[in-house]
Image (cartoon, helix red, strand yellow):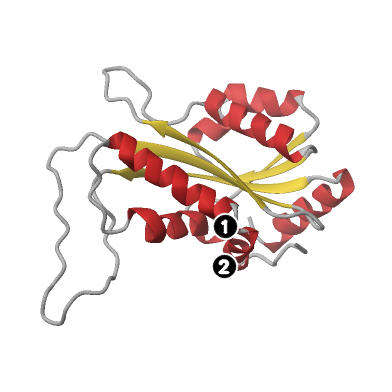
């Protein structure tokens, strides 16, 4: 996706009175993300890590933009199952439900921009898009995280609530993630900065 595709998405959104919605997914584990911090001179800070931790949370998030409207963040966490045969990530139905939730919350049509993940291109998802005229999908090119503002959301989350932290268990990790994402939700200027941090021309928000 380049400037031409974004222009097409913006034109489509303007014609439909739609929101432009970027989607991305990530995973956060019990192993702490390392980040710079303060410490007494000569004393390297040490964060203990529990071995063989099975706590891991999958995340999917939508960064939502529309001229004249406050930018929004909608997300869904999912604890990964380690049972044999269990699906560890999101299924196409999970993504469908997240997009439906966004449609209801935003109160209008959506131009959805996401990557070429296999589950995004599944037969079920393609059929759902074809059957609903309020949903238009534009695919990002492979390996282009710099084009997706949700990558900026993940960076804010890591720096604000998971860096250098030893979590007691997966429940505590999920609570920290929810707290961090709610904080971002309450500051639309941060969501706008994530869009400006991409190489895409900014939307008029």
Residue 170 x %, y %: 29, 36
Q: Is 70 on the left or on the right of 51, as rendered?
A: right
Q: Is 132 on the left or on the right of 98, as rendered?
A: right
Alpha carbon separation for disc pair 2 and 1: 7 Å
Q: Is residue 142 visible?
A: no
The single residue placed furthest to the right in the displayed view is: 15
Say which of 9 and 56 sits in front: 56
Mark 2 residue element: loop
Q: How many marks?
A: 2
Few, some or many residues within 10 Å of mark 2 (<14, 14–19, 20+): some
Say which of 189 and 128 sits in front: 189
Q: Is 117 on the left or on the right of 19, as rendered?
A: left
Mark 1 residue element: loop
Residue 32 x %, y %: 25, 52
Q: Which mark is residue 197?
A: 2
> Contact, CB < 8 Å: mark 2 with mark 1?
yes
Q: Earlier in the sequence, mark 2 or mark 1?
A: 1
Q: Residue at image x 38%, y 54%?
A: 161
Few, some or many residues within 10 Å of mark 1 (<14, 14–19, 20+): many
Q: Is residue 149 visible?
A: yes
Quarter of the rendering occupied by the N terminus: bottom right
Q: Which mark is residue 15?
A: none
Residue 49 x %, y %: 15, 49
Q: Is 89 on the left or on the right of 140, as rendered?
A: left
Q: Residue at image x 50%, y 40%?
A: 60
Q: Residue at image x 86%, y 43%?
A: 16
The single residue placed furthest to the top in the displayed view is: 85
Q: Which mark is residue 149?
A: 1
Say which of 161 and 82 sits in front: 161
Say which of 146 and 1 sits in front: 146
* Above or below for 69 versus 106: below
Quarter of the rendering occupied by the C terminus: bottom right
């Amino acid at each position: 996706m380049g400037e031409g595709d974004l222009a097409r998405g913006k034109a489509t959104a303007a014609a439909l009175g739609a929101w432009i919605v970027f989607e991305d997914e990530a995973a956060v584990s019990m192993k702490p993300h390392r980040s710079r911090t303060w410490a007494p001179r000569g004393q390297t800070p040490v964060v203990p890590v529990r071995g063989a931790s099975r706590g891991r949370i999958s995340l999917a998030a939508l960064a939502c933009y529309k001229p004249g409207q406050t930018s929004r963040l909608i997300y869904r966490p999912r604890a990964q199952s380690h049972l044999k045969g269990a699906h560890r990530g999101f299924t196409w139905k999970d993504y469908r439900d997240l997009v439906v939730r966004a449609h209801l919350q935003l109160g209008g049509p959506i131009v959805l921009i996401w990557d070429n993940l296999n589950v995004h291109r599944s037969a079920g998802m393609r059929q759902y898009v074809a059957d609903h005229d309020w949903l238009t999908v534009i695919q990002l090119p492979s390996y282009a995280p710099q084009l997706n503002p949700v990558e900026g959301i993940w960076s804010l989350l890591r720096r604000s609530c998971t860096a250098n932290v030893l979590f007691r268990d997966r429940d505590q990790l999920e609570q920290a993630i929810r707290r961090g994402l709610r904080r971002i939700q309450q500051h639309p200027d941060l969501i706008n900065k994530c869009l400006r941090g991409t190489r895409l021309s900014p939307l008029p928000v």
